[in-house]
């Protein structure tokens, strides 16, 4: 079945890079996403990557996709206190006629001074 | 700033009761999806509506039902509430099928069943 797994916690020093890792099981995934959720808020799409791409860079964010190993990572350069949040890895494809998104359990990123 | 509005923001219900959660989508978004996010978990797909018809469903029982209206609003109804229904319920709207990151999520309704 479809499954997305990621580590639960990550702590980094302010100014360092953060790397959040994720693995997924569905080889038919079309899109892979990273969402950010701050306390009391909904989900904010940070970035996404097509399954036929290896890398995508967007300002401080770099997404790496290893399709062979079904491994996705998100690197946040120069991590700031405002980056503290829960980060969800997610994937979607076409299931029947609905584009549902399968989410991981989220990685809580905390920033230490 | 999100264009999807959910109401109420918080709700407390008693086991066995029924609840209706509401979502107002962005104008022009003809697809709405509902997700349940239990504490400490990622969101799980409940169902999706496209042009007022259910267009896909996750692993949720029939007591979870929905409606979508022509004015881009929608409802999630849950009958016979159980304690495990306590969660954050998220509405996401999109244009057409919503792929390529086209979903806009609301801030959610936190439902507590006691």
Image (cartoon, rainbow, N blue to C red):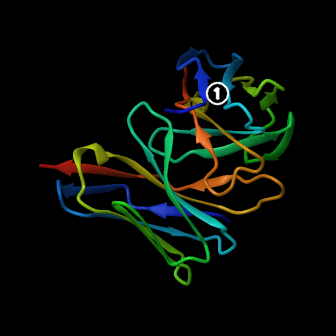
Subunit under mark 1: B
Q: Return the x and y of residue B6 as percentages of the image width and height.
A: 60, 24
**Residue sitting at 59 percent across and 15 percent down?**
B13
**Which image quadrant: the C terminus of chain B?**
top right
Q: Return the x and y of residue B22 as percentages of the image width and height.
A: 68, 22
Residue A18 sits above or below residue B23 on the image: below
**Residue sitting at 49 percent across and 32 percent down?**
B1
Residue A82 in the figure: left or right of residue B31: left
User: B70 or B83: which is nearer to us?
Assistant: B70
Is residue A59 in sight in this rendering?
yes
Residue B14 sits above or below residue B68 on the image: above
**Residue position for label 1:** B82
**Residue sitting at 65 percent across and 64 percent down?**
A2
Q: Secondary structure at mark 1?
A: loop
Residue A39 sits above or below residue B94 on the image: above
Q: Return the x and y of residue B12 as percentages of the image width and height.
A: 55, 16
Residue B10 in the figure: left or right of residue A100: left
Q: Return the x and y of residue A95 as percentages of the image width and height.
A: 77, 59
User: Where, by quadrant of the figure, is residue B73 drawn?
Assistant: top right
């Amino acid at each position: 079945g479809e499954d997305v797994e990621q580590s639960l916690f990550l702590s980094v020093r302010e100014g360092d890079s953060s790397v959040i890792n994720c693995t997924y099981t569905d080889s038919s995934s079309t899109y892979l996403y990273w969402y950010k959720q701050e306390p009391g808020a909904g989900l904010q799409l940070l970035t996404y990557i097509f399954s036929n791409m290896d890398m995508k860079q967007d300002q401080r964010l770099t997404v790496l996709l290893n399709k062979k190993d079904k491994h996705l990572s998100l690197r946040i350069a120069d991590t700031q206190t405002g980056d503290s949040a829960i980060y969800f890895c997610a994937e979607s494809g076409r299931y029947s006629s609905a584009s549902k998104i399968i989410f991981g359990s989220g990685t809580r990123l905390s920033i230490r001074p | 700033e999100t264009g999807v509005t959910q109401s109420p923001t918080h709700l407390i219900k008693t086991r066995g009761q029924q609840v209706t959660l509401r979502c107002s989508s962005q104008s022009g978004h003809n697809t709405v999806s509902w997700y349940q996010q239990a504490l400490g978990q990622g969101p799980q797909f409940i169902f999706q509506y496209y042009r007022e018809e259910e267009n896909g469903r996750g692993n949720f029982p029939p007591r979870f039902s929905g409606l979508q209206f022509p004015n881009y609003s929608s409802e999630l109804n849950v009958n016979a509430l159980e304690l495990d229904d306590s969660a954050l319920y998220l509405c996401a709207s999109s244009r057409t099928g919503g792929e390529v990151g086209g979903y806009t999520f609301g801030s959610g309704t936190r439902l507590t069943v006691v």
